Image (cartoon, grey):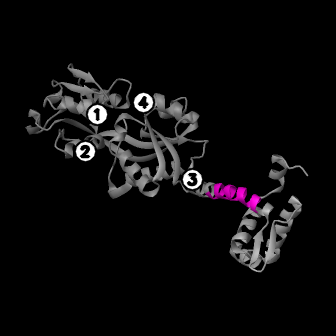
Amino acid sequence: MKYTDISIARKLKFHQLMVLDQVVQSGSMLRAAQALNLTQPAVTKVIHDLESYFDAPLLVRGNRGVRSTELGELVLKRAKGLLAELRSLTDEVNAFQAGTSGQVVVGTLISASVSLLPRAIRLLKQRAPGVMVSLRVGQMDQLFPALAVGDLDLVVGRIPDDWQWRDEAGELTVASLYNEGLSVVAGAEHPLHGESALRLADLQGSPWVLPTRESLLRRTADRLFAEAGLSLPQNVVESLSILTNLALMQDQQTIALMPQEAARPFTEAGLLKEFDLGESLIFGDIGCFFASGRELGPAARLFRECLERVSEADGESLLPGI
């Protein structure tokens, strides 16, 4: 009989090879049956089926128990490699299903890498060190289409007021994480920090860093000045680069708008100080977007759980996007 890849693939089964390997390792049909949680007749039948297929004995009985024939050794030599790959596949599939391996691709807005995402990633890595996290930074106009077509698993950032009217809205779902506040900040030595009862109008004449015009935070900034009956400042730099904005504010003159959690690490470090304008400023709800009709993979599900966990931790708001 001439064997082919197809004929062997159709006839041989992994569990038959596992039984053969265990019998040779154990040196006994009975001990192999016990190790495999099978009956001895079941083990004997498997060996008989294998020998019938190869039309030759694979095992012989001796004074010291069962041992393999020359053909049996040949089959086992290759079978061991297959069984090793099977064990690796089993481990990897179990890890993947548990979310402890694999990859999650997250879209985020510029400032969303400051607090929420690092904390969520740290928690993810504690639970599943083997998961690869890839971050893609952009604006919602870029991130929503990428999420809808599957280039991204999740998008984290501020929930736009108009997002339900966007082209991709029918394909996306959002889970709100927390409500974010807004801070008006400057270098810690800005001369107006010592003033009491400040209003936005008192800051209007200073140099400002405002978000770029296509960003969600810029819309919030425009609304803030409009509600105060003010025009936008005349001396403005438009930037979404947190490090650039931080450097600009070290002149102790320049003022900027930042989501509170984006500003917090720098205020705690003494690099920035928030102005008290006598009222709480609201940036909006921060959420996690995902595709409605596409089930999240285990790694992405675990990362979403980590986002929810850190956003609730200690009752703190964490980080927004812009």
Circle nearer the viewer, 3 or 2:
3
Q: Which residue is mark 1?
A: 242
Q: Residue at x 60, y 42 (%)?
A: 294
Which image quadrant is residue 27 in?
bottom right
Q: CA distance from mark 1 to mark 2?
A: 12 Å
Mark 1 or 2 closer to N-term? 1
Q: Residue type at mark 3: give it.
A: Phe
Residue 316 numbered mark, or none: none
Give me the C-alpha separation between circle 4 and circle 1: 15 Å
Q: Mark 4 sits on what residue?
A: 139
Dot 4 falls on a residue whose secondary structure is loop
Q: Choose between 223 and 296: the one closer to the eye.
A: 296
Instruction: Give whichever of 140, 93 is nearer the camera.
Output: 93
Q: Are marks 1 and 3 in contact (CB under 8 Å)?
A: no
**CA distance separating discs 2 and 4:** 23 Å
Label 3 to label 2, Cα distance in Å? 34 Å
State which tag comes first along the sequence, 3 or 2: 3
Q: Would you place residue 46 above or below residue 199 in this image?
A: below
Hey, which quadrant is residue 273 in on the image?
A: top left
Assess whether residue 39 is covered by the magenta stretch: no
Q: Quickly name the residue at label 2.
A: 265
The CA span between labels 4 and 3 is: 30 Å
> Which residue is label 3 attached to?
96
